[in-house]
Amino acid sequence: MEKTGIVIETTGEYMLVSVHRDSACGENCAACGLCKNNREMTLRLKNTDNFKIGEAVRLTSDDKKFLHHSAAGYLSLTALLITGGIIGGFLGGDWAAFLGAFFGLLIGIMLLKLSFKDKLEITAEKA
């Protein structure tokens, strides 16, 4: 994956980079209405090359690792959602199943945030 972004802030050894996010609908946003005006994404990265505010940077990452982490995230969230729903259903009916699925999903999100934090390596170089 390769994107170009603009450094919008530098603090210590980190920088914030604003990146234009691609749409999921093939740039036909009027058809799906999901994108609206939320097309910018901000990434916090290590400022290894002493970038300055306003500089253009090229961000690259390994597609294979990105897809691996995405698949692992979706599969683990789905498994925890279903497991929570089944356990809740055994313990007390429909509402318990709903709550079990909800808490399974919450636990999955927390585990993903902890386990995948800083795992995807994004390198920045001058554009």
Image (spheres, rainbow, N blue to C red):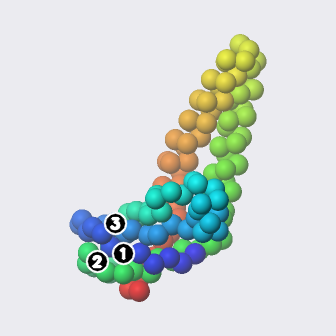
Give the class, few, some or many, for how many residues have Cα within 10 Å of label 1's Cα (few <14, many ≥20).
many
- Mark-to-mark CA distance, 2 and 3: 11 Å
- Point out residue 60 in the picture as x, y percentages from the top left corner: 51, 77
The image quadrant where one finds the C terminus is bottom left
Label 2, on which residue? 54
Q: Is residue 63 left or right of residue 56?
A: right
Q: Quadrant of residue 46?
A: bottom left
Q: Amino acid at mark 3?
A: Leu
Label 1, on which residue? 6
Q: Nearer the viewer, mark 3 or mark 1?
A: 1
Q: Secondary structure at mark 3?
A: strand
Label 3, on which residue? 16
Q: Amino acid at mark 2?
A: Gly
- Mark-to-mark CA distance, 3 and 1: 8 Å
- Mark-to-mark CA distance, 1 and 2: 6 Å
Above or below: residue 51 compared with residue 21: below
Q: Quadrant of residue 31?
A: bottom right
Q: Secondary structure at mark 1?
A: strand
Give the class, few, some or many, for how many residues have Cα within 10 Å of label 2's Cα (few <14, many ≥20).
few
Q: Secondary structure at mark 2?
A: loop
Q: Earlier in the sequence, mark 2 or mark 3?
A: 3
- Pick whichever, 67 or 6, lies toward us: 6
- Pick whichever, 98 or 31, lies toward us: 31
CB atoms at circles 1 and 2 under 8 Å apart?
Answer: yes
Residue furthest out toward the front = 30
- Point out residue 8 in the picture as x, y percentages from the top left corner: 30, 69
Residue furthest out toward the top = 92
Q: Amino acid at mark 1?
A: Ile
